[in-house]
Amino acid sequence: MTPSDARPVHLPEKASFIPFWDSLDKFHDLPAIAEPSTQRSWTYKQLAENVAAGAAQLSDGRKRLVLIFATNTADCVLLYLSALRANHAVFLSNHQIYDPPAATIIASYAPDSVFWSSGDPPDWSAEYEAGPSVHGLRQLRRSDHDMIAPRDELLLVLPTSGSTGNPKAVRLSTRNIAANAIQIQLGLDLGHQDRAVTVLPIGYIFGLSVLHSHLASGSLIVIQKLSILESGFWQIIRDFHVTTLAGVPFTYEILRQLRFDPRTTPSISTLIQSGGKIKSITLDWLRSTLNRQLNVYLMYGMTEGAGRLCILHPDALASKSDSVGLPVPFGEVEISRDSEILFRGPNVMLGYAKDRTDLLRRDDCCGALHTGDMGRKDTDGYVYITGRMSRICKILGRRYSLEDIESGFGDLEEVAAVSDDVTITLFHSGDSVCMQDRANLLTRQFNLPSRTLRLKFIPSIPRSLSGKVDYRALNKQIS
């Protein structure tokens, strides 16, 4: 499926996808954002006023690329919404300004403005000058003001490669973001009564989509940084009567091991899971135990789809638990001849980018997305994932390129990386001590917990008749 043969999708008029960041005040005095650590809170009216003021600070008559090193703070959310309101293109990074990949992003995209939370400017900032802070975040502005502006419809640029530092990113339009917020709102039946908490980073598409969909619904978002292993997190749940908890498979693996009992947090009524394959034992626990007391939604999403592509409703969890659900509203799924899952909808990205010049590109996808996942549909239209066509894995909800990880060992020994979406196994025939030292280095570089990257010695790496690594054979050796 290419842009030239993509069929049109039957969609509502563009006006139906009104950007939520432009209409926050329609919810008036409903609570919008709360930040327990600073004891600050905003109604939707107050949020709209703050966002408008921030947009005015950021506006100078032309569209710019704004890089935000994101953190789960209210100030960062206010800045992000202000940049959207000002119609700038926002590059949202989960890295921090002092991390090595930050310099790669700067070199590749030459952002017009850079925002970060605290600390002195880094070494690469020679081409920038200090600018006024906005919503408490520090700013660097590019000294060279002759950079070509991004395309007008471009709104958001999000990296695709987890924490590898690879500059490849997804280009998302205003329509993409606004549409997917409504798609999730309708799919989860979100409303004013819902209250969510930030469990995931807002610089990661799942965490960001939780923010988008709840703000589009007039819900309360509690902004915080604590993990579910900290007692303070659960006190926040109780203090703010949080109703919705969103997490990746690892989140629910921890909750299962902790023997999470919904009776200890009676306000929680909805659990949302996405971000990769979930262990069968944890899925059974969600289906047979938690779904009897709570509404458990399983979802399938990609950055390339602005967040979510499919949602499995709680009513179908018992009978369709192996499925990722039905396409989100206004979307549709087809299965290609080679079993690839193809998605069409208003949330499909404009295309990829690897540097600043790509921000001038037109829509490369025309609403049609090759997911790279293999799958099938049953007679009721439910979608099932049966494998991956690409060399991309998801670990703890983040996407990693197995080829990037393999290349990190290229000067030592040939390795072959395979993943079951829980761990990455590196098969090798080299010196185990040297390989382990390099593995320790790469876990830090890729921001991978050490337990998720393991080495396995093998006399020789199996190959097909054409000489390519036989990854299928290696997958069978994972124990």
Image (cartoon, rainbow, N blue to C red):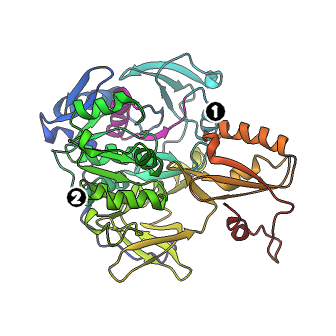
- Tag 2 residue: 16
Residue beneath the point at 15% across and 44% down: 193
Residue beneath the point at 54% across and 55% down: 352
Quadrant (top left/top right/bottom left/bottom right) for the C terminus: bottom right
- Res 103 label: 1
The residue type indicated by label 1 comes to Ala
- 240 with respect to 207 (left or right): left
Q: Which residues are magenta?
A: 72-96
- Res 372 label: none
- 301 with respect to 194 (left or right): right
The residue type indicated by label 2 comes to Ser
Q: Residues within 10 Å of mark 1 (few under 14, many from 20)?
A: some
Q: Quadrant of residue 439?
A: top right
Instruction: Tell me residue 65's x, y (percent).
Output: 48, 38
Quick check: can you spot residue 271?
A: yes
Instruction: Tell me residue 131's x, y (percent).
Output: 47, 20
Q: Nearer the viewer, residue 308 or 448?
A: 448
The reply to whether the C-beta atoms of the residues labelled 2 and 1 are less than 8 Å apart is no
Vertical position of residue 317 compared to residue 428: above or below: below
User: What's the CA distance linking mark 2 and mark 1?
Assistant: 39 Å
Instruction: Tell me residue 419's x, y (percent).
Output: 63, 58
Q: Is residue 73 magenta?
A: yes
Task: Classify mark 1: helix, strand or loop.
Answer: helix
Quick check: can you spot residue 350?
A: no
